[in-house]
Amino acid sequence: MPSIRWNVNYRQEQVGSAQLIGCIVRAPLVAVITVSVALAACGQSKTSGATFLSINTATITKGSFKPSIKAISPLESTTNVTLSPQTDGRVIKKLVKEGDQVQAGQVILVLDNTQLSAQLDASKSQARYDKVNAERYQYLYEQGAASAKRRDAYATKAIISRDQAIADKANLNYKFVRSPINGVIGDLDTVKIGDYVKTGDVITGIVDNSTLWTLMEIPASQGSQVKVGQPVRLVSQSTPPITGDGTITFVSPYYAIAQSGKPPNTLMVKAVFPNLTGQLKTGQYVASEIITGSSEQLAVPVQAVMMQAQQPFVYELVPVSKALPQIKRSANTTAQTLKKLEKLPGDTPIVLQTKVQLGDLQNNLYPVISGLKAGDEVAISNTSRLRSGMPVKVSAGAN
């Protein structure tokens, strides 16, 4: 057979890389047969003496996928308090600084307590004195040397002075502003030594970030898929991203009512995450995925997927003999191109641009909704150099 020289001009179409967000659902799709035959001198093919572009391929088979529902929402700590004094006073000591890890009961600030300390010392002395008298008159009463009335009077006085000492101690303790929880101190620069603070003044916040939760708004159309106990994957929007795993702990018993100008009905879902590394913070926005189950679906590798006008497609390998009827029906096929393809052996592989509908990317695989079937072969290398209708050479060991 005489050698065939391929010198065919082809129209180059701009194709972007495949980046799919969310589940792409479009009208039924068919293979696009834009036959612009381009033969590049890469792999050496002996077919008709021509040199064809060498590619690797993958066969469409089933893959394992975990359907999910996505939402973006802020994180909140399970324990978050404001620190306020329970009495008035002037700050004389700051024992921690912002960002410090503190324990429940740890002293944060000390207020002037000179007067209360002296008052407590006096009340303790009085309580001890009255207690001795009460015990003395109890003994005298038992010996018949004191009346019951006198005994009771001293006993009452001992009780009063004891209670006063307890009250004075409590008042003195209020001068030591303590953390009510384990956590991290917030901004403490607003309070300085010498400042006079009053009861109820907010001094700072203390946050326990060891466990965090987020409240997600789920579309009503997906609400029936969400259940308590389902796993949730979390990815922060920071660089580098921080990941975490949590669990659904609450699903609202009712839907939020849609209002004018607002999103449609939504379902509030709460998930809790252990902050094992301590890197996640209260108020941080995260992308969460609620894993609603698992399924086996046809899968296409991410390397095979291209984009054109926001439409995903792949280059499907088809024997030229099978593709010719479709190519002949294409308005873009020239007589010269068709003649050259007809001279090729029938088993020569060519690539056809085939539109596909895909789900969300998981583990470098897209679930196939439509456009491909099990056993189909697609190109996964040199895809940016391919054009629909181009003969190719499949690399040895590919697929």
Image (cartoon, helix red, strand yellow):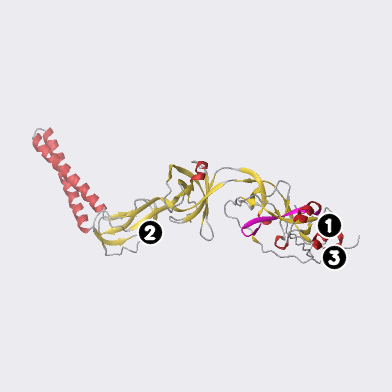
Q: Quadrant of residue 190?
A: bottom left
Could you tell whether 16 is left or right of 226 in the image? right
- Residue 112 in sight here: no
Look at 69% across and 52% down and name the residue there: 30
What secondary structure is the magenta-colored segment mainly? strand
Percent position of residue 339, x then y = 83, 60
Question: Are dots 1 and 2 in contact, CB under 8 Å?
Answer: no
Q: Who is closer to the viewer here, 380 or 242?
A: 380
In the rendered image of this protein, does residue 187 appear above or below residue 30?
below
What secondary structure is marked by label 2? loop
Q: Residues within 10 Å of mark 2 (few under 14, many from 20)?
A: some
Q: In the rendered image, which residue does mark 3 sit on?
A: 5
Q: Which residues are magenta?
A: 306-320
Q: In the rendered image, which residue does mark 2 sit on?
A: 186
Q: In the rendered image, which residue does mark 1 sit on?
A: 342
Q: Amino acid at mark 1?
A: Glu
